[in-house]
Amino acid sequence: MNNYHTHTYRCRHASGDIADYVASARAAGLSELGFSDHCPHPDGRWSDVRMDLSELSGYVEAIRAAQVDSVRADDSPSPSAALREPRVYAGLECEWVPEYVSFMRDEFLGTFGLEYLVAGIHNYLHRGEWRDTYTISPPAELASFGSTSRSAMESGLFSFLAHPDVFCYSWMPWDENARACARDILETAQRTGTPLEINGYGMRKARVRADRGSRHPYPHESFWELASEYRIECVINSDAHRPIDTAANLEDGLALARKYKIPVRETLF
Ligand SMILES: [Zn+2]
Ligand SMILES: [Zn+2]
């Protein structure tokens, strides 16, 4: 299996560095490991949960060093060494900030030459103001979370949308508002060909009380049941914030995809 959603200590709410996650991926037998730490912004916004812009080059250099090791193992005369070494990719998990679209494209994909970007909507635009995804309250805010997710996918910048059902962390009932938001995201994913992520981190968080008893904050079963009505693909990731979690819940994610017959995009590259 593969994992394309990995954080490092640089985001200030994860532990471990590149080499620690590569070692864990190797031990778990992963074929591909992508790093997607939370991206910095030129104005330093939301800096409590992400690296500073000045840390970006060190992050990319550490990934490039791991890639060199991976290629060396490929060239090694011992076939078993090559088999065990995961291929490593450099990415970032980005918020949808309209004024930084060209910055993300030109700097992250251009100057730094990253292999991919992930959209992860932890903040969304509501009537021109930023709101926190973990405290969505009235239906109008939920609709704004949906439209921010839609804009991110329509940009074509992102290889997948992380935790598309993260709104279920704060929106408890699976009601008409939740279904409308889910359909907005699912319709856009189908139209733009953007894979949606089944996120393992939500399965490791404390369960929440909802209308039908307790459940994971995300992934939400009802979201993926609805997803089966659309022609979309999913990617299954651990969203690791600790090296020990590099391959965590990937099997659970696969079981969820199979349950609702969602095709799985095995590799991004
Ligand atoms: Zn994070
Ligand atoms: Zn993440």
Image: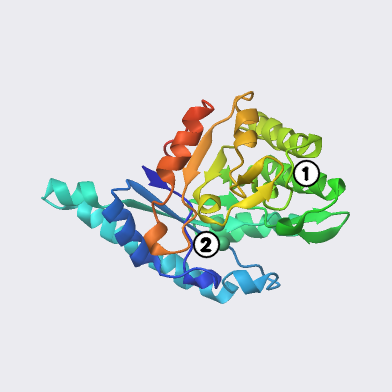
Q: Quadrant of ligand 2?
A: bottom right
Q: For numbered disc 2, what is the local secondary structure?
A: strand
Q: Which residue is mark 1?
A: 147
* Camera-side residue of 16 and 213: 213
Q: Residue at x 59, y 74 (%)?
A: 52
Quick one: label 2, few (<14), some, or many (20+) residues within 10 Å?
many
Q: Is residue 252 above or below residue 239?
A: above
Q: Residue at x 28, y 54 (%)?
A: 26
Crowd around label 1: few <14 · some 14–19 · many ≥20 (10 Å): some
Viewer-proximal residue among 172 and 199: 172
Residue 45, image x, y percentages: 70, 70
User: What amino acid is labelled 1 in the image?
Assistant: Ser
Rendered residue at 75%/43% (across/down): 146
Tell me if residue 47 comes above or below residue 111 in the rendering.
below
Q: Quadrant of the C terminus?
A: top left
Q: Where residue 37 is drawn, which disc sits there?
A: 2
Q: Is mark 2 within 8 Å of ligand 1?
A: no
Q: Residue 156: x, y in percent?
A: 64, 42
Going by the image, does 219 lie left or right of 29? right
C-alpha separation, residue under disc 1 versus residue under disc 2? 24 Å
Which image quarter is the N terminus in?
A: top left
Q: Are the residues flagged by discs 1 and 2 in contact, CB closer than 8 Å?
A: no
Residue 74 in percent (x, y) is at 22, 50
Lateral position of residue 45 relative to residue 15, left or right: right
Q: Most extreme residue toward the left, as rendered?
A: 77
Residue at 55% in and 42% down: 197
The three-letter code of the residue at mark 2 reads: Asp
- Seen in the picture, residue 147 relative to 239 is either above or below; the reply is above
